[in-house]
Image: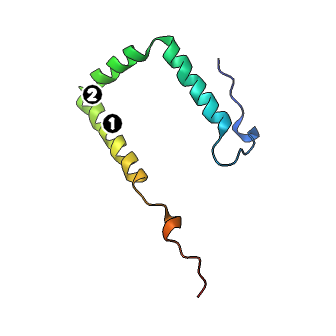
Amino acid sequence: MEKRKDVTKQRNEGEGNRTTAREYNEAQQRFVKSGQVGEKAREAERDLDKDSIRRELEHAEAVGKRHSADEDPEIRRSYRKD
């Protein structure tokens, strides 16, 4: 069982959370070492053959792309006081 910190007790680590990034990377390494990568890839490929799942995944991809395509509003913001 993974040890998880209580979110309310986590300290602010500034821009980027190194603790969470490290935990994520460790979880990814455990998954790779588990030997399940090939099996999960085949499951995903089979899921793409199912219309309802494929449409759901395509929708999620489109939503993600819409969010990432926006320009940072700070770029256009004017701080000049006229």
Cα–Cα span, label 2 and label 1: 8 Å
Q: At which x and y percent is residue 24?
A: 58, 29
In the displayed orientation, state which residue is furthest to the bottom.
Answer: 82
- Quarter of the image with the N terminus is top right
Other residues around mark 2 within 10 Å, as few (<14) / some (14–19) / many (≥20): some
Other residues around mark 1 within 10 Å, as few (<14) / some (14–19) / many (≥20): some
Residue tagged by mark 1? 57
Q: Which mark is residue 15?
A: none
**Callout 1 secondary element:** helix
Q: At which x and y percent is residue 17?
A: 65, 41
Q: In the image, is 55 to the left or to the right of 27?
A: left
Residue at the spot 71% in from the left edge and 31% down from the top edge: 5
In the displayed orientation, state which residue is furthest to the top.
Answer: 35
Q: At which x and y percent is residue 58?
A: 30, 39
Q: At which x and y percent is residue 82?
A: 58, 88
**Callout 2 secondary element:** helix
Tell me if label 2 and label 1 are in contact, CB under 8 Å: yes
Residue at the spot 71% in from the left edge and 44% down from the top edge: 13
- Residue 9's place in the image compared with 50, above or below, is below
Q: Quadrant of residue 8?
A: top right
**Residue type, mark 1 in image:** Leu
Residue at the spot 73% in from the left edge and 45% down from the top edge: 12
- Residue 61's place in the image compared with 53, above or below, is below
Q: Name the N-terminal-most of marks 2 and 1.
A: 2
State the residue in front, 14 or 10: 14
Residue tagged by mark 2? 48
State the residue in front, 52 or 12: 12
- Residue 35's place in the image compared with 5, above or below, is above
Rendered image coloring scheme: rainbow
**Residue type, mark 2 in image:** Leu
